[in-house]
Image (cartoon, rainbow, N blue to C red):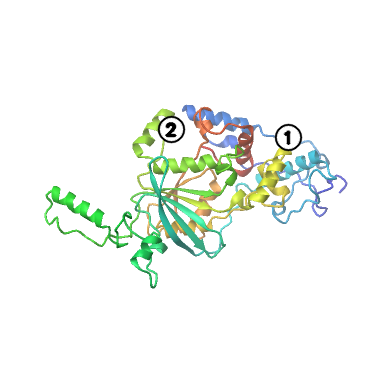
Amino acid sequence: MANLPSHASPYFSPQPPSPSNQDVGDISLNSSDPTTSLLKEKVEEFQGYDSPVSNPDQTNGDVTPSVPACLLSPSFTPPATPGGTLNPAQILQQTQAQAASARETSANTKAPKLLPRLPHVECIVRARIPTTNGAEMFLHLYHNDLDNKEHLAIVFGNHIRSRSLDQVRPGETEMDRMIRGAYVGKLHPGRVSSWYDEEKAEAAAKERAAEGAVNGAAFDQTQSTQSSPSQAPLVRIHSECYTGETAWSARCDCGEQLDEAARLMSLPIETLSEVASQQGLSVPSNSAGGVIVYLRQEGRGIGLGEKLKAYNLQDLGSDTVEANLLLRHPADARSYGLATAMLADLGLSNDINPHGIRLLTNNPDKVRAVEGPSREVVVKERVPMVPLAWSTGGKMGIKSSEVEGYLQTKISKMGHMLQ
Protein backbone atom coordinates (compact mmCIF):
# COMPACT_ATOMS: atom_id res chain seq x y z
CA MET A 1 0.00 0.00 0.00
CA ALA A 2 3.01 2.28 0.22
CA ASN A 3 2.85 3.07 -3.48
CA LEU A 4 -0.74 4.33 -3.37
CA PRO A 5 -1.24 8.11 -3.72
CA SER A 6 -2.51 9.87 -0.64
CA HIS A 7 -6.00 10.47 -2.00
CA ALA A 8 -6.68 6.92 -3.26
CA SER A 9 -8.90 4.54 -1.33
CA PRO A 10 -6.86 2.08 0.78
CA TYR A 11 -9.44 -0.63 0.09
CA PHE A 12 -8.36 -1.20 -3.54
CA SER A 13 -5.08 -2.73 -4.63
CA PRO A 14 -3.17 -1.19 -7.52
CA GLN A 15 -4.31 -2.57 -10.86
CA PRO A 16 -2.74 -2.21 -14.31
CA PRO A 17 -4.85 -0.16 -16.67
CA SER A 18 -7.02 -2.19 -19.04
CA PRO A 19 -6.45 -1.80 -22.78
CA SER A 20 -9.04 0.15 -24.73
CA ASN A 21 -11.74 -1.88 -26.46
CA GLN A 22 -11.87 0.49 -29.40
CA ASP A 23 -9.54 3.23 -30.43
CA VAL A 24 -10.68 6.38 -32.18
CA GLY A 25 -8.50 5.35 -35.11
CA ASP A 26 -10.68 2.27 -35.67
CA ILE A 27 -13.48 4.48 -36.97
CA SER A 28 -13.76 4.17 -40.72
CA LEU A 29 -12.74 7.35 -42.47
CA ASN A 30 -11.83 5.86 -45.85
CA SER A 31 -13.05 8.58 -48.17
CA SER A 32 -11.51 11.02 -50.59
CA ASP A 33 -14.06 13.68 -49.68
CA PRO A 34 -12.28 16.85 -48.47
CA THR A 35 -14.58 17.10 -45.46
CA THR A 36 -13.75 13.53 -44.47
CA SER A 37 -10.03 14.23 -44.88
CA LEU A 38 -10.32 17.20 -42.54
CA LEU A 39 -12.20 15.09 -39.99
CA LYS A 40 -9.53 12.39 -40.28
CA GLU A 41 -6.82 14.94 -39.52
CA LYS A 42 -8.75 16.08 -36.46
CA VAL A 43 -9.31 12.55 -35.18
CA GLU A 44 -5.64 11.66 -35.79
CA GLU A 45 -4.67 14.76 -33.86
CA PHE A 46 -6.89 13.71 -30.96
CA GLN A 47 -5.56 10.18 -31.22
CA GLY A 48 -2.28 11.49 -29.85
CA TYR A 49 -4.03 12.46 -26.62
CA ASP A 50 -1.86 11.68 -23.60
CA SER A 51 -2.32 8.17 -22.31
CA PRO A 52 -1.93 7.53 -18.58
CA VAL A 53 0.39 4.55 -19.19
CA SER A 54 2.55 4.05 -22.26
CA ASN A 55 5.25 1.67 -20.98
CA PRO A 56 3.98 -1.85 -20.20
CA ASP A 57 7.21 -2.64 -18.31
CA GLN A 58 6.37 -0.20 -15.52
CA THR A 59 5.47 -1.71 -12.19
CA ASN A 60 2.27 -0.98 -10.36
CA GLY A 61 4.13 1.25 -8.00
CA ASP A 62 5.17 3.55 -10.85
CA VAL A 63 1.69 4.37 -12.10
CA THR A 64 -1.59 5.64 -10.77
CA PRO A 65 -3.79 2.63 -9.93
CA SER A 66 -6.95 2.01 -11.93
CA VAL A 67 -10.15 2.90 -10.10
CA PRO A 68 -13.41 0.93 -10.53
CA ALA A 69 -16.04 2.77 -12.56
CA CYS A 70 -18.37 2.82 -9.56
CA LEU A 71 -16.11 5.36 -7.88
CA LEU A 72 -16.49 7.84 -10.75
CA SER A 73 -19.88 8.95 -9.51
CA PRO A 74 -21.37 11.18 -6.78
CA SER A 75 -20.10 8.62 -4.25
CA PHE A 76 -16.49 9.45 -5.16
CA THR A 77 -15.40 12.21 -2.77
CA PRO A 78 -11.97 13.84 -3.08
CA PRO A 79 -10.52 14.58 0.38
CA ALA A 80 -9.74 18.21 -0.38
CA THR A 81 -10.20 20.89 -3.00
CA PRO A 82 -7.30 21.17 -5.48
CA GLY A 83 -5.14 24.15 -4.66
CA GLY A 84 -5.31 23.58 -0.90
CA THR A 85 -2.82 21.41 0.95
CA LEU A 86 -2.50 18.95 -1.95
CA ASN A 87 -0.37 19.22 -5.07
CA PRO A 88 -2.68 20.40 -7.94
CA ALA A 89 -0.41 18.91 -10.62
CA GLN A 90 -0.44 15.52 -8.90
CA ILE A 91 -4.24 15.59 -8.53
CA LEU A 92 -4.63 16.47 -12.20
CA GLN A 93 -2.37 13.60 -13.30
CA GLN A 94 -4.13 11.09 -11.07
CA THR A 95 -7.61 12.19 -12.16
CA GLN A 96 -6.64 11.91 -15.82
CA ALA A 97 -5.47 8.34 -15.26
CA GLN A 98 -8.63 7.39 -13.34
CA ALA A 99 -11.01 8.91 -15.90
CA ALA A 100 -9.19 7.40 -18.87
CA SER A 101 -9.01 3.94 -17.26
CA ALA A 102 -12.70 3.93 -16.36
CA ARG A 103 -13.62 5.06 -19.83
CA GLU A 104 -11.46 2.39 -21.45
CA THR A 105 -12.94 -0.46 -19.43
CA SER A 106 -16.61 0.54 -19.79
CA ALA A 107 -16.99 2.57 -22.99
CA ASN A 108 -18.33 -0.30 -25.07
CA THR A 109 -20.10 -2.31 -22.37
CA LYS A 110 -21.91 0.13 -20.12
CA ALA A 111 -25.52 0.57 -21.23
CA PRO A 112 -27.11 4.02 -20.99
CA LYS A 113 -29.22 4.65 -17.92
CA LEU A 114 -32.90 4.11 -18.71
CA LEU A 115 -35.84 5.04 -16.50
CA PRO A 116 -37.99 2.02 -15.49
CA ARG A 117 -41.01 3.79 -17.03
CA LEU A 118 -41.61 6.87 -19.09
CA PRO A 119 -42.69 9.90 -17.04
CA HIS A 120 -46.09 11.45 -17.62
CA VAL A 121 -45.87 14.63 -19.67
CA GLU A 122 -48.50 17.17 -20.67
CA CYS A 123 -48.22 20.02 -23.15
CA ILE A 124 -49.61 23.09 -21.37
CA VAL A 125 -49.41 25.67 -24.13
CA ARG A 126 -48.24 26.06 -27.74
CA ALA A 127 -47.52 29.25 -29.68
CA ARG A 128 -46.40 30.12 -33.21
CA ILE A 129 -42.94 31.73 -33.31
CA PRO A 130 -41.80 33.54 -36.47
CA THR A 131 -38.01 33.32 -36.71
CA THR A 132 -35.36 35.74 -37.90
CA ASN A 133 -34.66 33.68 -41.04
CA GLY A 134 -38.29 33.86 -42.16
CA ALA A 135 -39.32 30.35 -41.10
CA GLU A 136 -41.96 29.56 -38.49
CA MET A 137 -41.99 27.07 -35.66
CA PHE A 138 -44.31 26.15 -32.82
CA LEU A 139 -42.96 26.31 -29.29
CA HIS A 140 -44.52 23.73 -26.93
CA LEU A 141 -44.15 23.99 -23.14
CA TYR A 142 -44.39 20.78 -21.12
CA HIS A 143 -45.01 19.89 -17.48
CA ASN A 144 -44.21 16.43 -16.09
CA ASP A 145 -44.33 14.27 -12.97
CA LEU A 146 -40.55 13.76 -12.75
CA ASP A 147 -39.35 17.27 -11.88
CA ASN A 148 -40.77 20.77 -11.52
CA LYS A 149 -39.01 22.20 -14.57
CA GLU A 150 -40.66 23.48 -17.75
CA HIS A 151 -39.19 21.56 -20.68
CA LEU A 152 -39.74 22.63 -24.27
CA ALA A 153 -40.32 21.16 -27.73
CA ILE A 154 -39.58 23.29 -30.79
CA VAL A 155 -41.63 21.86 -33.67
CA PHE A 156 -41.11 22.61 -37.35
CA GLY A 157 -43.96 21.59 -39.66
CA ASN A 158 -47.75 21.61 -39.28
CA HIS A 159 -48.34 17.85 -39.10
CA ILE A 160 -46.49 17.16 -35.82
CA ARG A 161 -48.99 17.81 -33.04
CA SER A 162 -49.25 17.19 -29.30
CA ARG A 163 -51.89 14.70 -28.28
CA SER A 164 -52.14 16.02 -24.72
CA LEU A 165 -52.56 19.58 -26.00
CA ASP A 166 -55.40 18.67 -28.38
CA GLN A 167 -57.40 16.82 -25.74
CA VAL A 168 -60.61 18.59 -24.74
CA ARG A 169 -60.48 19.82 -21.15
CA PRO A 170 -63.60 20.04 -18.96
CA GLY A 171 -65.35 23.39 -18.97
CA GLU A 172 -63.11 25.11 -21.53
CA THR A 173 -64.46 27.35 -24.24
CA GLU A 174 -63.31 27.67 -27.84
CA MET A 175 -61.45 30.82 -26.86
CA ASP A 176 -59.71 28.90 -24.05
CA ARG A 177 -58.53 26.30 -26.56
CA MET A 178 -57.18 28.89 -28.97
CA ILE A 179 -55.39 30.77 -26.18
CA ARG A 180 -53.52 27.65 -25.07
CA GLY A 181 -52.68 26.81 -28.70
CA ALA A 182 -55.01 23.83 -29.26
CA TYR A 183 -56.15 24.90 -32.73
CA VAL A 184 -55.67 23.83 -36.35
CA GLY A 185 -54.43 26.14 -39.09
CA LYS A 186 -53.52 29.68 -38.05
CA LEU A 187 -55.03 32.21 -35.70
CA HIS A 188 -56.34 35.49 -37.09
CA PRO A 189 -58.60 38.29 -35.86
CA GLY A 190 -62.23 37.21 -35.75
CA ARG A 191 -61.61 33.47 -35.57
CA VAL A 192 -64.15 31.72 -33.32
CA SER A 193 -63.43 27.98 -33.66
CA SER A 194 -60.35 26.02 -32.64
CA TRP A 195 -61.33 23.07 -34.85
CA TYR A 196 -62.20 24.93 -38.05
CA ASP A 197 -60.21 27.66 -39.82
CA GLU A 198 -62.72 29.63 -41.93
CA GLU A 199 -60.10 31.42 -44.02
CA LYS A 200 -58.27 28.19 -44.81
CA ALA A 201 -61.55 26.46 -45.73
CA GLU A 202 -62.62 29.28 -48.02
CA ALA A 203 -59.26 29.34 -49.77
CA ALA A 204 -59.39 25.59 -50.30
CA ALA A 205 -62.95 25.78 -51.65
CA LYS A 206 -62.00 28.51 -54.11
CA GLU A 207 -59.01 26.46 -55.27
CA ARG A 208 -61.21 23.42 -55.87
CA ALA A 209 -63.78 25.48 -57.73
CA ALA A 210 -61.09 26.99 -59.93
CA GLU A 211 -59.87 23.51 -60.82
CA GLY A 212 -63.40 22.52 -61.83
CA ALA A 213 -63.59 19.68 -59.38
CA VAL A 214 -66.78 17.67 -59.30
CA ASN A 215 -68.77 18.34 -56.10
CA GLY A 216 -66.27 21.02 -55.29
CA ALA A 217 -68.63 22.54 -52.74
CA ALA A 218 -68.30 19.47 -50.57
CA PHE A 219 -65.48 20.33 -48.19
CA ASP A 220 -64.71 18.43 -45.05
CA GLN A 221 -65.07 21.02 -42.30
CA THR A 222 -63.89 18.67 -39.59
CA GLN A 223 -60.21 19.35 -40.05
CA SER A 224 -58.35 16.60 -38.30
CA THR A 225 -55.79 17.29 -35.62
CA GLN A 226 -54.46 13.74 -35.93
CA SER A 227 -51.68 13.37 -38.47
CA SER A 228 -48.30 11.74 -38.74
CA PRO A 229 -45.13 12.37 -40.76
CA SER A 230 -44.84 10.82 -44.21
CA GLN A 231 -41.22 9.86 -43.46
CA ALA A 232 -38.78 9.88 -40.56
CA PRO A 233 -38.49 13.46 -39.21
CA LEU A 234 -35.29 15.02 -37.92
CA VAL A 235 -35.04 15.15 -34.13
CA ARG A 236 -32.50 16.86 -31.90
CA ILE A 237 -32.40 16.25 -28.13
CA HIS A 238 -30.72 19.40 -26.80
CA SER A 239 -29.76 20.09 -23.20
CA GLU A 240 -29.88 23.66 -21.96
CA CYS A 241 -26.57 25.54 -22.13
CA TYR A 242 -26.88 29.13 -20.94
CA THR A 243 -23.21 29.90 -21.50
CA GLY A 244 -23.08 28.55 -25.05
CA GLU A 245 -26.49 29.80 -26.20
CA THR A 246 -26.75 33.17 -24.46
CA ALA A 247 -23.34 34.21 -23.10
CA TRP A 248 -21.42 33.60 -26.39
CA SER A 249 -19.14 31.03 -24.77
CA ALA A 250 -16.41 29.47 -26.93
CA ARG A 251 -15.83 26.66 -24.41
CA CYS A 252 -18.38 24.39 -26.15
CA ASP A 253 -20.30 24.07 -29.39
CA CYS A 254 -23.78 23.78 -27.83
CA GLY A 255 -25.08 27.07 -29.27
CA GLU A 256 -23.75 26.17 -32.70
CA GLN A 257 -25.45 22.76 -32.56
CA LEU A 258 -28.80 24.31 -31.60
CA ASP A 259 -28.59 26.81 -34.47
CA GLU A 260 -27.57 24.13 -36.95
CA ALA A 261 -30.41 21.82 -35.92
CA ALA A 262 -32.94 24.63 -36.39
CA ARG A 263 -31.42 25.49 -39.76
CA LEU A 264 -31.70 21.92 -41.01
CA MET A 265 -35.33 21.70 -39.91
CA SER A 266 -36.57 25.10 -41.04
CA LEU A 267 -34.89 26.13 -44.29
CA PRO A 268 -36.49 25.18 -47.63
CA ILE A 269 -35.00 22.01 -49.05
CA GLU A 270 -33.83 23.93 -52.14
CA THR A 271 -31.74 26.20 -49.95
CA LEU A 272 -30.35 23.24 -48.02
CA SER A 273 -29.37 21.49 -51.24
CA GLU A 274 -27.58 24.59 -52.51
CA VAL A 275 -25.62 24.98 -49.27
CA ALA A 276 -24.80 21.27 -49.28
CA SER A 277 -23.42 21.41 -52.82
CA GLN A 278 -21.25 24.41 -51.94
CA GLN A 279 -19.78 22.68 -48.88
CA GLY A 280 -19.58 19.19 -50.36
CA LEU A 281 -21.95 17.82 -47.72
CA SER A 282 -25.05 15.67 -47.79
CA VAL A 283 -27.86 17.47 -45.97
CA PRO A 284 -30.83 15.36 -44.86
CA SER A 285 -34.25 16.37 -46.16
CA ASN A 286 -36.51 18.23 -43.77
CA SER A 287 -39.71 17.59 -45.70
CA ALA A 288 -41.01 15.47 -42.80
CA GLY A 289 -40.58 18.34 -40.36
CA GLY A 290 -38.50 18.27 -37.24
CA VAL A 291 -38.47 18.53 -33.46
CA ILE A 292 -35.90 19.99 -31.08
CA VAL A 293 -36.59 18.70 -27.56
CA TYR A 294 -35.06 21.28 -25.23
CA LEU A 295 -34.36 19.74 -21.82
CA ARG A 296 -33.56 21.91 -18.81
CA GLN A 297 -30.51 19.98 -17.63
CA GLU A 298 -27.75 22.59 -17.64
CA GLY A 299 -24.14 21.52 -17.53
CA ARG A 300 -24.81 17.87 -18.44
CA GLY A 301 -27.18 17.73 -15.50
CA ILE A 302 -25.12 19.41 -12.73
CA GLY A 303 -26.63 22.91 -12.92
CA LEU A 304 -25.25 26.30 -13.88
CA GLY A 305 -23.49 27.03 -10.56
CA GLU A 306 -21.56 23.76 -10.57
CA LYS A 307 -20.84 24.20 -14.27
CA LEU A 308 -19.15 27.55 -13.59
CA LYS A 309 -17.04 25.88 -10.90
CA ALA A 310 -16.09 23.26 -13.49
CA TYR A 311 -14.99 26.08 -15.82
CA ASN A 312 -12.61 27.32 -13.14
CA LEU A 313 -11.20 23.81 -12.74
CA GLN A 314 -10.70 23.68 -16.51
CA ASP A 315 -8.68 26.89 -16.31
CA LEU A 316 -6.62 25.16 -13.62
CA GLY A 317 -5.81 22.33 -16.03
CA SER A 318 -8.67 19.80 -15.88
CA ASP A 319 -10.76 18.83 -18.87
CA THR A 320 -14.58 18.83 -18.88
CA VAL A 321 -14.83 15.23 -17.61
CA GLU A 322 -12.18 15.58 -14.89
CA ALA A 323 -13.74 18.82 -13.65
CA ASN A 324 -17.10 17.11 -13.07
CA LEU A 325 -15.44 14.24 -11.23
CA LEU A 326 -13.47 16.58 -8.98
CA LEU A 327 -16.75 18.29 -8.07
CA ARG A 328 -18.15 14.85 -7.11
CA HIS A 329 -20.50 14.67 -10.09
CA PRO A 330 -20.77 12.04 -12.82
CA ALA A 331 -19.08 12.87 -16.10
CA ASP A 332 -22.60 13.03 -17.58
CA ALA A 333 -25.62 13.19 -15.26
CA ARG A 334 -28.27 13.63 -17.96
CA SER A 335 -31.24 11.36 -18.63
CA TYR A 336 -33.57 11.25 -21.62
CA GLY A 337 -36.79 9.67 -20.40
CA LEU A 338 -38.57 13.01 -20.59
CA ALA A 339 -37.44 13.46 -24.18
CA THR A 340 -38.84 10.04 -25.12
CA ALA A 341 -42.18 10.82 -23.44
CA MET A 342 -42.39 14.19 -25.21
CA LEU A 343 -41.65 12.61 -28.60
CA ALA A 344 -44.38 10.03 -27.95
CA ASP A 345 -46.83 12.82 -27.08
CA LEU A 346 -45.93 14.51 -30.39
CA GLY A 347 -46.98 11.41 -32.30
CA LEU A 348 -43.50 10.05 -33.00
CA SER A 349 -43.85 6.79 -31.06
CA ASN A 350 -43.99 3.36 -32.68
CA ASP A 351 -47.75 3.00 -32.37
CA ILE A 352 -48.40 6.11 -34.49
CA ASN A 353 -45.25 6.77 -36.51
CA PRO A 354 -43.92 3.64 -38.28
CA HIS A 355 -41.17 5.64 -40.00
CA GLY A 356 -39.13 6.24 -36.83
CA ILE A 357 -36.93 9.28 -36.41
CA ARG A 358 -33.51 10.49 -37.59
CA LEU A 359 -31.58 11.66 -34.56
CA LEU A 360 -29.13 14.55 -34.85
CA THR A 361 -26.36 13.60 -32.43
CA ASN A 362 -22.69 12.70 -32.10
CA ASN A 363 -23.32 10.67 -28.94
CA PRO A 364 -23.97 6.97 -29.71
CA ASP A 365 -25.19 6.34 -26.15
CA LYS A 366 -27.97 8.90 -26.67
CA VAL A 367 -29.45 6.81 -29.50
CA ARG A 368 -30.40 3.92 -27.21
CA ALA A 369 -31.36 6.21 -24.33
CA VAL A 370 -33.83 8.20 -26.44
CA GLU A 371 -35.55 5.04 -27.67
CA GLY A 372 -36.87 4.44 -24.16
CA PRO A 373 -37.04 1.39 -21.85
CA SER A 374 -39.43 -0.50 -24.18
CA ARG A 375 -38.23 1.13 -27.41
CA GLU A 376 -41.25 3.39 -27.52
CA VAL A 377 -39.41 5.47 -30.15
CA VAL A 378 -37.23 3.96 -32.89
CA VAL A 379 -34.14 5.77 -34.16
CA LYS A 380 -33.82 4.77 -37.82
CA GLU A 381 -30.69 6.82 -38.46
CA ARG A 382 -28.05 8.78 -36.54
CA VAL A 383 -27.23 12.03 -38.34
CA PRO A 384 -23.84 13.43 -37.22
CA MET A 385 -23.36 17.10 -36.35
CA VAL A 386 -19.90 18.00 -37.62
CA PRO A 387 -18.50 21.23 -36.10
CA LEU A 388 -18.74 24.04 -38.65
CA ALA A 389 -15.08 24.92 -38.17
CA TRP A 390 -14.19 21.40 -39.32
CA SER A 391 -16.68 21.11 -42.19
CA THR A 392 -15.78 24.52 -43.64
CA GLY A 393 -12.02 24.35 -43.13
CA GLY A 394 -12.12 27.08 -40.47
CA LYS A 395 -14.14 29.57 -42.53
CA MET A 396 -17.15 29.32 -40.22
CA GLY A 397 -17.92 28.14 -36.72
CA ILE A 398 -16.24 28.51 -33.34
CA LYS A 399 -12.46 28.84 -33.29
CA SER A 400 -10.83 28.66 -29.87
CA SER A 401 -8.38 26.48 -27.97
CA GLU A 402 -11.10 25.78 -25.39
CA VAL A 403 -13.59 24.32 -27.86
CA GLU A 404 -10.84 22.22 -29.48
CA GLY A 405 -10.00 20.74 -26.08
CA TYR A 406 -13.69 20.20 -25.39
CA LEU A 407 -14.16 18.27 -28.64
CA GLN A 408 -10.97 16.33 -27.97
CA THR A 409 -12.33 15.17 -24.62
CA LYS A 410 -15.68 14.22 -26.16
CA ILE A 411 -13.91 11.94 -28.63
CA SER A 412 -11.23 10.45 -26.39
CA LYS A 413 -13.18 10.06 -23.12
CA MET A 414 -16.91 10.15 -23.93
CA GLY A 415 -16.94 8.09 -27.11
CA HIS A 416 -18.52 10.74 -29.33
CA MET A 417 -18.35 10.22 -33.09
CA LEU A 418 -18.00 13.49 -35.00
CA GLN A 419 -18.64 11.97 -38.41
Q: Residue furthest right?
A: 2
Residue 194 in percent (x, y) is at 32, 62
Give the left or right position of residue 261, taking residue 246 as reference: left
First-in-chain label (1 vs 2):
1
Secondary structure state at the residue bearing disc 1:
loop
Measured along the vertical axis of the image, is residue 137 above or below residue 278?
below
- Report the amino acid beneath label 2: Leu
Residue 254 is left or right of residue 103, and the answer is left
Crowdedness near tag 2: few (<14), some (14–19) or many (≥20) residues, C-alpha within 10 Å: some
Q: Which residue is mark 2?
A: 281
Please determine whether, in this image, residue 33 is positioned above or below residue 93. Answer: above
Residue type of the residue flagged with mark 1 = Ser
243 relative to 134 in the view: left or right:
right
Q: Marks 1 and 2, Cα distance to the nearest angstrom?
A: 38 Å
Q: Position of residue 185 (x, y in %)?
A: 31, 55
Horizontal and vertical percent for residue 130? Answer: 40, 46
The label number, if any, that marks residue 54 in the structure image = 1
Give the residue displayed 32% in from the left and 54% down from the top. 186
Q: Badge 1: how crowded within 10 Å, few (<14), some, or many (20+)? A: few
| Label disc, if present, on residue 23 of the rendered structure | none
